[in-house]
Amino acid sequence: MLNLTPAETSERTALRINPCKTCQPVGALYAALGVHNCMPHSHGSQGCCSYHRTFLSRHFKEPAIASSSSFTEGASVFGGGSNIRTATKNIFEIYNPDIIAVHTTCLSETIGDDMNAYIRDMEIPEGKLVVHTNTPSYVGSHINGFFNMMSGFIKYLAKSSGKPNSKSVIFPGFVNPGDMRELKRIAKLMNAPTIMFPDTSQVMDAPMTGTYAMYPKGGTTISEIVSLGDCEKVFALGELTSEEPANALDRKCGVKYELLPLPIGIANTDTFLVRLSHWTKNEVPYELEEERGQLVDVILDSHFYLSGKKAAIFGDPDTVLGLTSLALELGMIPKYVLTGTPGDAFVRKGTKLFERAGVTGCTVKAPGDLFELHQWIKNEPVDILLGTSYGKQIAKAEDIPFVRVGFPILDRYAHSYFPIVGYRGSLRLVEKITEVLMDRQDRDAKDEDVEIVM
């Protein structure tokens, strides 16, 4: 790789090298898996569906079920109407889901399939449902696909009966099942009756029972999605992921929402708890106060290894912003902050975090790619890399300590069971970050001893 000065580099707008994202249908498929007894359906070729399932299965180490319209050359010319009608008929007869959640692929979007018309013309069995969303892969990222699928469910199902159900809604953002479990635990401790949508806990982290279940016990039920319109408030976690579905529910049913950062780190988790406390009129219980105090204690204990260390952080926008906030709380310098998901809001929010902390000389960008991140690091190195498995080649090439966090993590196990949100999740992140930096310091000290002996 060439070492170029900023003046010698030019902005690439026509291509990405080693993208920091994947395509919309992956996110749509994941959102649909968070609905109980739901069959995600890929309206396109079998190859697309296979890729999206494989991507999720490699991250979660769990089967990601989905069906396909199985496009061939004929569908490319005459449209996919016949394919989707045949597919849904077969799916209901063979796999018997309660609902089919259809997302489109590049080919379907390019030829201009009218999914609303196709669904209106279907013969859907009594008591069964079909919903859809448009997810062109050449626009946005898997984050867009995730919130588009959420909006699709809301558009089709959410209703307001005029009788409030005294519940709130948590939109968890694009996070792991372990994070969703932690958010539900926090809500339970706060005595906050909530509906989480979507909810992939007990689905993508289901236990081994010896018997395969195509539809595990978990997931937001259809009745819960319908009742979203009667909820009192939405806590939309992940400002760049959850705003669109929160807006969709507000427009349709008048349910107001609070847009909050993903609760990673002390300040973001504090904000979430304060908002829950205001809504429930309940005080924060001692159990959560104790967890906060433990996190603060560990940060103080580990400051010697963390203070002033430069970090490069990349991945999904809300996860990256949460990690950046935590890094600043640790006294670190988030030198490079990058996401592959388009959106000027990411840059504004990242810049605001730097300004609030009084940190200068940092770079924040959206959208970007890992080739560009690698170039930045070669020009001005960092002490640690935080991001997905795709950063391991950068870490190896530049000999940088590396903490895998976010989506996807393809070369490690059990990570999706453990949260990174809340005080507990943040404590785990501090442990992992401190551990790799301590190991590096020990290695460097050993190398110095060897040089002295020689």
Image (cartoon, rainbow, N blue to C red):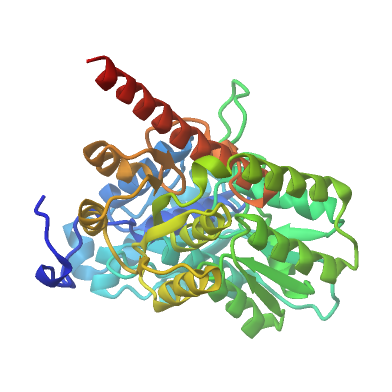
* Viewer-closest of 255 and 408: 408
Q: Residue furthest top?
A: 453
Can you say which quadrant of the picture contains the C terminus?
A: top left
Q: Residue at x 41, y 69 (%)?
A: 360
Residue 209 makes an appearance in the image: yes
**Depicted 418 relative to depicted 105: above or below:** above
Q: Residue at x 66, y 62 (%)?
A: 267
User: In the rendered view, does 388 fall on the left or right side of 393?
Assistant: right
User: In the rendered view, does 179 fall on the left or right side of 254?
Assistant: left
Question: Which x, y percent locates residue 292?
Answer: 74, 49
Q: Residue at x 35, y 71 (%)?
A: 342
Question: Which x, y percent locates residue 386?
Answer: 41, 47
Q: Residue at x 27, y 67 (%)?
A: 138
Question: Which x, y percent locates residue 265?
Answer: 61, 55
* Viewer-closest of 392 and 411: 392
* Viewer-closest of 202 and 158: 202
